[in-house]
Amino acid sequence: MGEIKEIKDLPGIGTQGAEKLFKANYKTLESIAVASPMELMEVAGLGDKTAEKAIKAARDALEMGFETADKIKKRREKIGKLKTGSKELDALLGGGVETQSITEIYGKMSSGKTQWCFQLCVMAQLPVEKGGLNGNVLYIDSEASFRPERVVEIAKAQGLDPEKTLKNVYVARAYNADHQMLLAEKAEQLIKEKNIKLLIVDSLTSQFRSEYIGRGLLAERQQKLNKHMRQLMKMAEINNIAVLVTNQVMERPDILFGDPTTPIGGNVVGHASKTRLYLRKSKGPKRIARLIDSPNLPDGEAIYQITEKGIEDI
Ligand code: GTP
Ligand code: MG
């Protein structure tokens, strides 16, 4: 067997199989390597043995599977830290928003979630020495709240050319939950072509929440959300990009003392987000971010403000 460089080189696939997979949005070896045999059987009509073999060959070609710990260390050394514009916030985050995992920000209306998205759209484009990721941004907007004018203001405050900054942000509007998931799938290809370093989903849950109403549909909603989160997680890891998702909140009726505010999506979202921040509004432009259950950082809060320049220290 020759060297495996693309999908058509996989055993049992060939040009025809590769075409079918391409149409179903499997365009890279990575996308095959992280697929399940069931998926490939369904979307491309592969036999179960062929699907299994193809996945295994893709994993081998990419050297996925068991790997020695020194390689993991090497990959972790590549984790980038995207600065937010506030030193307080960066310190809370252990240096900034990390690549290779999902960062979730949740909070009530007007707590500043979308403002964070605009801010990071700009910050990601800064050179690494200035706290950026020296890359471009994919923005999935499910609430029609993307505002280029606001990105322009923040870009100016960071000393960037506003027009260039806008050209580096690829925005797609998600019209329903399935469409949102499809956009995330399509992102895979664009990430490589356009030097994407940050993927934003604002909001992660609102479409799911409005489509799957009531207890009867909760299980289905959670399964879909789970799939979506895994998709995003894989993308973060494989491509060494930062993924920022926003989440809405609800009031838990069973909490009588303390803050009953809790993010949507339960454990499905909670476990997939490596870093979770709870955003609250304070007086005027003042905002508070609280780090929730981080595996490697101390819990704590940071106070910052949102002004016409974007996110800043007070
Ligand atoms: P929902 O999407 O409704 O759940 O809210 P959100 O958390 O996304 O809130 P968003 O990020 O849209 O925050 C809105 C708040 O940010 C406003 O109430 C303002 O306080 C602040 N803000 C938004 N735009 C500007 C601006 O141009 N200048 C200043 N100074 N503040 C702004
Ligand atoms: Mg918003």
Image (cartoon, helix red, strand yellow):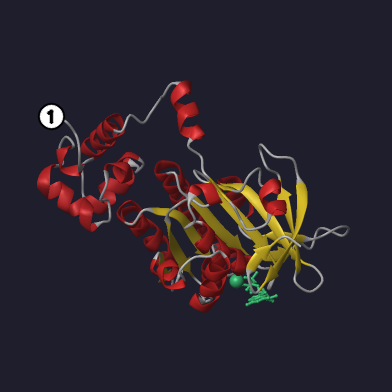
Q: Can you identify the residue that label 1 sits on?
A: 2
Say whether mark 1 is within 8 Å of ligand 2.
no
Indicate the quadrant where residue 251 lies. Answer: bottom right
Return the residue found at the far right: 257
Label 1: how many Cα within 10 Å (few below 14, some 14–19, many 20+) = few
Image quadrant where one finds the N terminus: top left
Quarter of the image with the C terminus in it: bottom right
Amino acid type of the residue tagged 1 in the rendering? Gly
Asked whether 221 or 278 is in front, the reply is 278
Residue 134, percent from left and from top: 44, 52
At x 21%, y 45%, the residue is 46
Question: Residue 281, how many percent across, how many down?
Answer: 76, 68
Expressed as whole percent of the image width and height from the top left, the position of residue 136 reads: 42, 58
With 38 as the anchor, is 278 left or right in this view?
A: right
Q: In this view, does 234 lie above or below 73?
A: below
Figure check: 205 above or below 52: below
Task: Locate residue 258: give its quadrant.
Answer: bottom right
- Number of disc labels: 1
Relative to the observer, which residue lies in front, 183 or 267?
Answer: 183
Q: SS class of the residue under badge 1?
A: loop
Look at 20% across and 43% down and name the residue there. Answer: 7
Q: Which quadrant does ligand 1 occupy? A: bottom right
Depth check, front residue: 99 or 32: 99
Residue 110 pos. (x, y %): 68, 73
The answer to whether one can see residue 63 in this image is yes
Say left or right for 198 vs 112. Answer: left
Residue 77 drawn above or below residue 103: above
Q: Give the camera-side residue of 313 and 197.
A: 313
Q: Measuring 80% from the left and 68% from the top, which residue is drawn there?
A: 282
Q: Is residue 212 visible?
A: no
